[in-house]
Image (cartoon, rainbow, N blue to C red):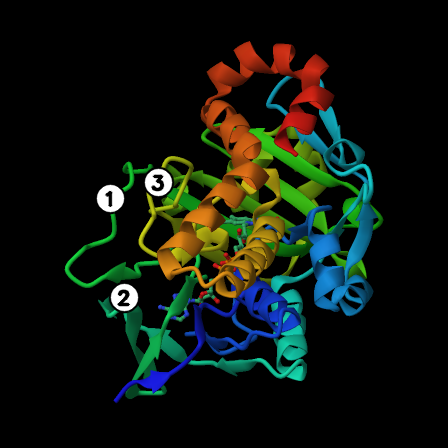
Amino acid sequence: MPEQVPILVCGGSLAGLSAALSLKRFGLDALVLEKACFPRPKLCGEFLGPDSFAVLERLGVLEPIEQHAAGPIAESVFYPMTGAAFTVKMQWLNPKRPYGLGISRDVLDTLLMAHARQQGIAIIEQAKVLPEVRRENGHFIVEVVIQGQRRQFETPILIDASGRYSGLHLSGKAKSPSKPQPKRLGIRFKVHTPTLAKDQALRMFLFPQGYGGIQPLPGGVSNVCMLTGQAYSPMLQRPFTDLIRETIGQNPQAWERLADASLVEPMQTTVASNMNLPGASLDEFLRIGDAMMTLDPVTGSGMSVALQTGELAAAVIAAGLRQGHRYDQIRAAYHREYHCLLGNRIRVLKLFRPVLFSPALQRVCLPFVKPVLPIVARIFR
Ligand SMILES: Cc1cc2nc3c(=O)[nH]c(=O)nc-3n(C[C@H](O)[C@H](O)[C@H](O)COP(=O)(O)OP(=O)(O)OC[C@H]3O[C@@H](n4cnc5c(N)ncnc54)[C@H](O)[C@@H]3O)c2cc1C
């Protein structure tokens, strides 16, 4: 017999924990199933954007996060391959909290998980939800492998927070095919460099077929994270300095800052395939964070969107349950609220995404974009 759970959250990272903590504030209990054991490695630029803070404050975990973060980071400076740099001020994105922070993902995720446990949220780690989900009499039945043992859970409310590789689908219906996306290679280093030791800006560099960022972290460490074409894969075997020079270092402004960098943590890589980019149709479950949609990492807003959508889902579920709504009505209401919150951001991203990977488009578009950046930022927000 399946174990009965009122609300089940698949994925215990930012989106999943934000949802579970927010549900708790509405007096609703959720079980969180997380396949990894925290802290787990997670490739990320580690820039926590201005829209995160109000949510983290409501979740009751902002203070410890601020204590473990570098910042405040008041601006993000973009460096094209040629021509002048341009600056995006955090004030344009969020006038009330005009700054971002730099924090290691393992620290952030672990702080959030410890806080959730303190609040009494049931979390099972090393619990992998199997992708095929059954639906019977309006309830979902999921199979889970927990430390080698199979268990079944039954729930009327299933939240998918399992990130951009979510494969959850209803049995008999494979996940709706989204448009094929080009594969990208994600690379992350943590470095020490005297040039950047006291830097207080997020710096983004465009280079042929990719872009990367340098983000200050506590202790004079910088996170160097990039997303680039698969053509760069063979370079992963090269010595660290060569790899930097031949990727992000092709941008002279990046090389100036990284030429004297020394590695403080082993390099991490990921193949960023099947990203749920804008346009994907994902309508079987209530999905939050990257499981719903991956915002391009260049925006530095994936983490804040994960936190925001977790909180949004909780509010919609609480309101729906109070009114006696069924799951499908709740999910439809969530989709409407989601598009109110993020519709403009998604439209701006659709427009600008091709520019990120094309120097030719950058040459044509950037001179026109620069003067209207505050307006674009306002639409984005
Ligand atoms: C190269 C790169 C750089 C980035 N840099 C930034 C940045 O600087 N700032 C920013 O804000 N965002 C950044 N992002 C985006 C950010 O990392 C994501 O948007 C964010 O992690 C999404 O959170 P999430 O909780 O939705 O998903 P995730 O963080 O991906 O969490 C999903 C969780 O679900 C678990 N899970 C998966 N499948 C299952 C299963 N079957 N059963 C149980 N558990 C499961 C996973 O173990 C994981 O813990 C970057 C992304 C990339 C690729």
- Which element is circle 3 on? loop
The residue that appears at 70% across and 47% down in the rendered structure is: 51
| Location of mark 2 (residue) | 131
State the residue in front, 154 or 369.
Answer: 154
* Mark 2 residue's CB less than 8 Å from ligand 1: yes
| Location of mark 3 (residue) | 280
Q: Is residue 100 visible?
A: yes
> On the picture, is 92 further left or further right than 7?
right
Among numbered discs 2 and 3, the one appearing first in the sequence: 2
State the residue in front, 148 or 357.
Answer: 148
Amino acid type for the residue under numbered disc 1 = Pro
- Which element is circle 2 on? loop
- Compared to residue 216, the image places residue 259 above or below, namely above
Query: Farthest residue toward the front?
Result: 323
Amino acid type for the residue under numbered disc 2 = Pro
Q: Quadrant of the N terminus?
A: bottom left
Judge the density around disc 3: few (<14), some (14-19), many (≥20) Cα neighbours within 10 Å: some
- Which element is circle 1 on? loop
Judge the density around disc 1: few (<14), some (14-19), many (≥20) Cα neighbours within 10 Å: few
How far, Cα to Cα, is label 3 from label 1?
Answer: 8 Å
- Which image quadrant for residue 7? bottom left
Discs 2, 3 touching: Cβ within 8 Å: no
The residue that appears at 53% across and 34% down in the rendered structure is: 343
State the residue in front, 135 or 277.
Answer: 135
Q: Is residue 164 visible?
A: no
| Location of mark 1 (residue) | 177
